[in-house]
Amino acid sequence: MHSRLTVAIISTLLAGLFALGGCGRGEAPGGDRLELVVATIPPIRGLIRPLLPETIGVVTLVEPGQNAHGHRLTPAQVATARTADVLFAVGMGMEEGALEQFQRDRPAHQQIAVFAELVDAGLSADAHAEHDHAAGERASHADMHVWTDPVLCAEFVQAASAMLIERVHAAQPSLAADIAARRDAMLARIRTVDAAYAERLAPFSGQSVLTQHPAFARMLARYGMHEFSLSATSGHAGPSAAELSAALATVRDRGVVAVFLEPQAPSALPRRIAEQAGLPIGTLDPLGSGDWEAMMHSNLDALVATLTQASARP
């Protein structure tokens, strides 16, 4: 399942924007101040929230626990996005048409920052080559799940904090200094996550896993592993014989050692594959609850536990 705001929300966006009319903050004074930040998905909030004091609101358009695939923004969410001083998005197709709509209708006071444009996310075909596709996987985008890679997240936090500091340094100098201190602390925590992944995944370097969609290709490639992924839509009505056969061939031919589910996706096909191939099953969450560090540590624990179980198989 690709965690994307789909084109289906555009009609809602347009309705909300027209209803707002001139009621946004586009003409409000203090355009260089910072009071409200919006992130499109929870992991981006998890990277931005630690940079700012609690007096500044940081909210998401897709709340933790919601299925971002096919998510329709409510008029209230559209209004929140429009009143934000800064809106953080992923880019690379994650938000589909919603991001373009926000950019076209951006109020004068608002800045829009796109993760993939702030860092070297490798938007070329080379980035897409970091993972392979099993049965039915759609190859229309490079791997857009940039927030699963700690190295890219450090670049993002560095760039995002610089943008925020530049915005507020004149009108809110104490806030600018606070952001700088918080940036340094957050970068230290990201480096700790990176070091933990490097150390704990080192014994599994070169191994391959099967996931439900390519949400972890960047992260696994960073630490010397390989991801093969199923179709984003496979399993909704139960796996077909062709899907199962193709996936089992991938598992066999590529030496896959474990299968990972996602809490947001149907699990019939990967469970059947694991059962027939005799592989252990784990769960990786690409979205989390809005706490980036907790999400990353939980996924690392799941990887290590499942891969250790795989290593113990005769």
Image (cartoon, rainbow, N blue to C red):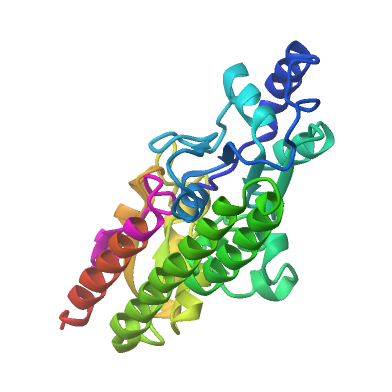
Q: Among all residues in the image, which is located at the extreme top?
A: 19
Pick the residue in front: 207 or 165: 165
Image height of 284 relative to 32, above or below: below
Please name the residue shown 15% across and 81% down the image: 312
Could you tell me if residue 214 is visible in this image?
Answer: no
Compared with 269, 5 (above or below) is above
Snapshot quadrant of residue 5:
top right
Q: Quadrant of residue 30?
A: top right
Asked whether residue 160 appears in the rendered view, the answer is yes
State yes or no: residue 122 in magenta: no
Q: Quadrant of the C terminus?
A: bottom left
Question: What span is in magenta?
Answer: 275-294
Number of numbered discs on residues: 0
- Tell me the residue at 75%/20% (across/down): 17
Residue placed most toward the observer, 282 or 90: 90
Residue 277 in magenta?
yes
Q: Which of these two is toward me, 291 or 267?
A: 291
Location of residue 261 with respect to 4 vertically, above or below: below
Q: Residue at x 33, y 81 (%)?
A: 201
Q: Position of residue 212 (x, y in %)?
A: 44, 55
Query: Residue 278 lies in what quarter of the image?
Result: bottom left
Residue 104 image point, x, y percent = 84, 35
How far across and how far down the image is residue 90, in percent? 63, 52
Query: Which residue lies at the image location 79% right of the left edge and 14% below the top edge?
Result: 21
Locate residue 84, reporting x and y percent.
Answer: 64, 34
